Every structure is written in structure tokens, then in C-alpha cells.
């Protein structure tokens, strides 16, 4: 399994507020209309899972499998062509700020690893950037 990480993003809100917003995927409503439609289409979600249609890749579903209040939300891919896990880590940075990072583990063979590494890293970085811009 290969592990990929986004850069650490600073969020000017306490850890508990960030966690409370991210642990309920119904809060993705605020992202509708802000996502680049050439990269992501048809966002569907409920409290525990989200599905997006990624052009050239197809529908991707992530499902929350574990919540570690207030520091981590763990997801697994469902219906993905390769087994994958993703988690959002949130740590306090003083009383009124947090740091956040998105991490993914993807199970691919050596041949595919080189092909997916750049898109996975770019996707994690974009996800972390979007999550850092949410109003908490």
C-alpha cells in the first residue's frame, strides 16, 4: 500500500469547530457551485458518505468508517477500482487555530504506482486547499 499526504494547512478556527463541520458530510452543501465542474461533477452526499463523478475516472464514493473526535475522520473508498483509504487529520495550533492534513493509502501494484502518484498527490492537495477555505 502506498501512502500520500497533502501539505499541512492552517485553519484559523479551533480544532473542535473544524472537526464538527467535517464529520458530517451534509455540510458539503456549502461547496456546491464552488467545485471546478471540469474536474468534479454530480456531488451527492449524506451524513456518512459522498459520491462524485470524476471525468475520465468515473463515480467515486467515500464512506466514513471511523470518527476520532476531535482529531481524525477516516474514510474508505467504495466502488473504487483499487482499494483506498483516506483520512483527515486535525490538530490544535493554539486555542483558536488548527492544522489539517489529508492522507491517502492506495493499494496498487508497482506498475500502476508511477501512473497514479502525481494525480493522487494533486487531488489530495486540492482537497486540502478546499477544506482549508471552508467557513468554520
Image: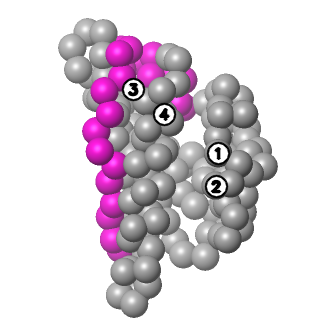
Callout 2: 10 Å neighbours few (<14), some, many (20+)?
A: few
Q: Secondary structure at mark 2?
A: loop
Q: Which of marks 1 and 4 precedes in the sequence?
A: 1
What residue sits right under mark 1 in the picture? 36
Q: Can you tell which quarter of the image residue 90 is in?
A: top left
Label 3: which residue? 70
Give residue 39's mark: 2
Earlier-in-chain disc, 2 versus 4: 2
Across and down, in percent, residue 114 comes to 37, 80
Q: Which residues are magenta?
A: 1-23
Tag on residue 89? Answer: none
Vertical placement of 110 versus 73: above or below? Answer: below
On whether residue 14 falls in the magenta region, the answer is yes
For image coordinates 43% across by 30% down, the residue present is 132
Q: Residue at x 43, y 84 (%)?
A: 112
Residue under numbered circle 4: 131
Residue 79 placement: quadrant: bottom right
CB atoms of marks 2 and 4 within 8 Å = no
Work out which residue is located at the far bottom of the displayed protein and give it: 111
What's the distance in space between the residues labelled 2 and 4, CA to CA? Answer: 16 Å
Asked whether the residues under the numbered discs 2 and 1 touch, taking CB atoms below 8 Å apart as contact, a structural biologist would say yes
Sooner in the amino-acid sequence: mark 3 or mark 1? 1
- In the rendered image, residue 10 lying in the magenta stretch gets the answer yes
Q: Earlier in the sequence, mark 2 or mark 3?
A: 2
Amino acid at each position: 500500500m502506498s501512502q500520500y499526504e497533502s501539505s499541512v494547512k492552517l485553519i484559523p478556527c479551533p480544532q473542535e469547530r473544524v472537526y464538527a463541520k467535517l464529520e458530517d458530510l451534509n455540510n458539503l452543501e456549502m461547496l456546491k457551485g464552488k467545485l471546478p465542474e471540469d474536474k468534479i461533477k454530480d456531488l451527492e452526499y449524506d451524513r456518512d458518505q459522498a459520491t462524485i463523478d470524476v471525468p475520465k475516472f468515473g463515480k467515486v464514493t467515500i464512506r466514513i468508517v471511523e470518527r476520532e473526535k476531535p482529531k481524525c475522520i477516516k474514510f474508505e473508498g467504495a466502488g473504487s477500482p483499487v482499494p483506498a483509504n483516506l483520512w483527515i487529520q486535525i490538530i490544535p495550533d493554539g486555542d483558536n487555530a488548527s492544522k489539517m492534513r489529508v492522507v491517502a493509502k492506495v493499494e496498487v501494484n508497482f506498475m500502476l504506482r508511477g501512473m497514479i502518484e502525481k494525480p493522487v498527490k494533486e487531488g489530495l492537495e486540492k482537497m486540502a486547499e478546499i477544506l482549508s477555505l471552508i467557513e468554520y
